[in-house]
Image: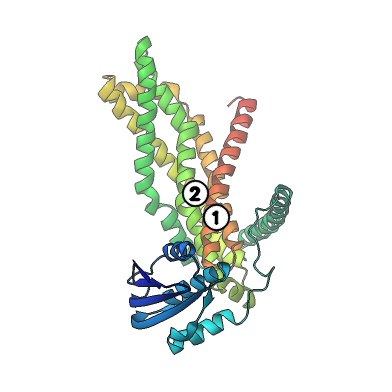
Amino acid sequence: MSTINLDKYQLEVSDSCATLHIYGDWNFSTGIPQLEPLAAQLATVTGCRDLTFNFEKLGDWDSGLMTFLIGLLANCSEQNITVDPKGLPEGIQQLLKLATSVPEREGTRRPVLGQPVLARIGNVTVEMHRNWGDLLAFLGETFYAVLNLLRGRARFRSSDLMYQIEGAGPMALAIITLISTLVGMILAFVGAVQLRMFGAQIFIANLVGLGIAREMGAMMTAIIMAGRTGAAYAAQIGTMQVNEEIDALKTMGISPIEFLVLPRLLALFLMMPLLCVYADFMGILGGAVVSALMLDISFFEYYQQLQSAVALKHFLIGVIKATIFGLIVATSGCFRGMQCGRSASEVGFAATNAVVTSIVLIVVADALVTIICQILGY
């Protein structure tokens, strides 16, 4: 007779029989031994055809022990070893009978396979078609709500509009200040490195002024609002969709577009031009700070050069872009929120899709407005 000591169990092997002694606690909190060492020992024992158990020293146990025993029974079946369950406690025997009474039906476990490429393309196409249909319906309802607003028939609370204006305007000034100032300083620094090589440091005001006024002021403001406000709109309306609050509004005969979307649309439509003007000022101020520190250009010289190089039309173009971007951000956020499913994960997807949709449409709209201004000579 030979004895093999392993973690929490001992295997005694005789001529044709092996006895497994189980001792100690067998639960997930104290750890369950691995089955592989025992299976390897059983495989090396020659002439062993029977396995019995001794559970006299077993402590606390849970389902971890059952998992170990079920795996051991399967391994013994593969090695043609007969298992005698008489040494097991009565409760464990009953559980093993329940676990092994009905074998797993072949074919019921669905294999995990990757989706074919053509199926992926089809799913994406169907989803795009559905999105376009939903978007057209949403835009139509929004246009109708705007007409009702112009006729004085739109139904929403003025307090909601003021709350949305506060959230999209004054509450966003801190992040707009930080980002716009840093962008202006970065533009000035990049331009200073090159212009200083030619002794044309004074033209740093032209670079920063035109870049901020026409492009970067409106663009950075829109991207900030897309990540800050557009995602919030999608999450708020999406949560209402999950809680069936939008269904309740429809049941009471109140248009969700007028009650929820219209205040948010008006808030960004009114606040984005003002935020753009503020961002322009902070960006130009950041460029002036870099010019004064790196190039020894006083604020008065910087202002004089800026006044002669940047006409009012450039600021107006930036403000027009910001207004368009504000409508895009509000529309994308509200649309993704109204399109949200009925689970918490769908709310997260709606917020993510709102930001992605807003940024993509902002870049496309900026390119189109720039091309139109180039054709018109502005």
Of the residues under marks 1 and 2, which one precedes in the sequence?
Answer: 2
Q: Secondary structure at mark 2?
A: helix
Amino acid type, label 1: Gly
- Cα separation, mark 1 vs mark 2, equals 8 Å
Image position, residue 119 (x, y; %): 72, 52
Observer-nearest residue: 41 or 329? 41
Residue 246 occupies which quadrant of the picture? Answer: bottom right
Image position, residue 302 (x, y; %): 33, 23
Image position, residue 206 (x, y; %): 42, 22
Query: Coloring scheme of the render?
Result: rainbow
Image position, residue 283 (x, y; %): 38, 34
Observer-nearest residue: 341 or 110? 110
Specify whether residue 227 is in view: yes
Amino acid type, label 2: Ala
Q: Tag 1: Cα neighbours inside 10 Å, few (<14), some, or many (≥20)?
A: many
- Mark linked to residue 226: 2
Q: Secondary structure at mark 1?
A: helix
Q: Quadrant of the N terminus?
A: bottom left
Q: Mark 1 highlights which residue?
A: 333
Label 1 with label 2: CB-CB less than 8 Å? yes
Name the residue rendered at 39%, 34% in the picture. 183
Observer-nearest residue: 37 or 156? 37
